[in-house]
Amino acid sequence: MARHTQSGLSPKETLSQKWRRTSQLIKRLKAAHPDARCSLNYSNPLELLVATVLSAQCTDARVNSVTKSLFKKYRTASDYAAAPPGELEEDIKSTGFYRNKAKALRGSCAELMAQYSGEVPANMAALVRLPGVGRKTANVILGNAYEVAEGITVDTHVRRLAGRLRLSQHSDPDKIEQDLLQLVPREDWIIIGHLLILHGRRICSARAPKCPVCPVNDLCPSAKVRPSSSPT
């Protein structure tokens, strides 16, 4: 007898079964987290680029605290590109890894000035050529600042949940993204990142996932406690 029969999960899930399960996962996560959105504060694409770079190994709450004054001091790509390294490092110090982050900000903004008249480009190829900008940052900018779905944001929460939900067996973010792109409809590429991130923060935490109250409990191969009946 197959394991997890009460939830319909099979140890040898076919691709079509995984598609259907993923569809149900998205539906339930949307119902559970209707407020899912980017939690970084920004008012334009440049501010989002800066905030996303600062968010590496740092909480969004801390980044928002730092950018509240940072965005008043640095308003254009030229401002960041021309900032003395030591001064910019001090301004973002509390976000951690501030030397590397300051170098990335100055470099990417110098490139924006040289190639794009100080504007943040709205396509993946151009964004990932900027210093310090990878696919994760590019997906955040494209999806939230421009509402362009070119990929799926994979951060630490998405990486963890993709593994627990058996949506990907990889640990490399780029490979995880490719797996998700095969399972998630393009119209949900932007929202799925927000949903998984919020679910990871609220329910499926790294050390103590709240399996008994998880709305996708019966759809999760990793759930430690299963409900007596599946939610509709």
Image (cartoon, rainbow, N blue to C red):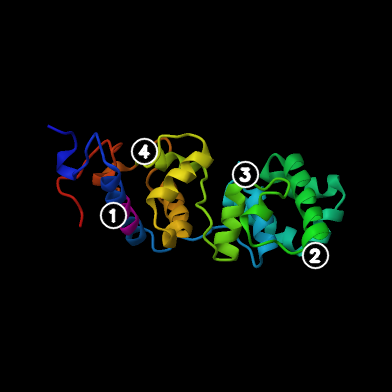
Q: Earlier in the sequence, mark 2 or mark 4?
A: 2
Of residues 147 and 215, the one drawn nearer to the viewer in this rendering: 147
Select label 2 or label 1 by which is in front. 2
Q: Which residue is mark 2?
A: 117
Q: Which residue is mark 4?
A: 164
Marks 1 and 4, Cα distance to the nearest angstrom?
16 Å
Per the rendered image, the range of residues in magenta is 22-27
Q: Amino acid at mark 2?
A: Ser
Q: Is residue 61 above or below residue 145?
A: above
Q: Is residue 159 above or below residue 140?
A: above
Q: Amino acid at mark 3?
A: Ala
Disc 4 crowd rating (10 Å Cα; few below 14, some 14-19, many 20+) is some
Select label 4 or label 3 by which is in front. 4
The image quarter containing residue 117 is bottom right
Residue that sits furthest to the top in the current view: 1
Q: Residue 194 lies in magenta, yes or no?
A: no
Q: Secondary structure at mark 1?
A: helix
Q: Secondary structure at mark 2?
A: loop
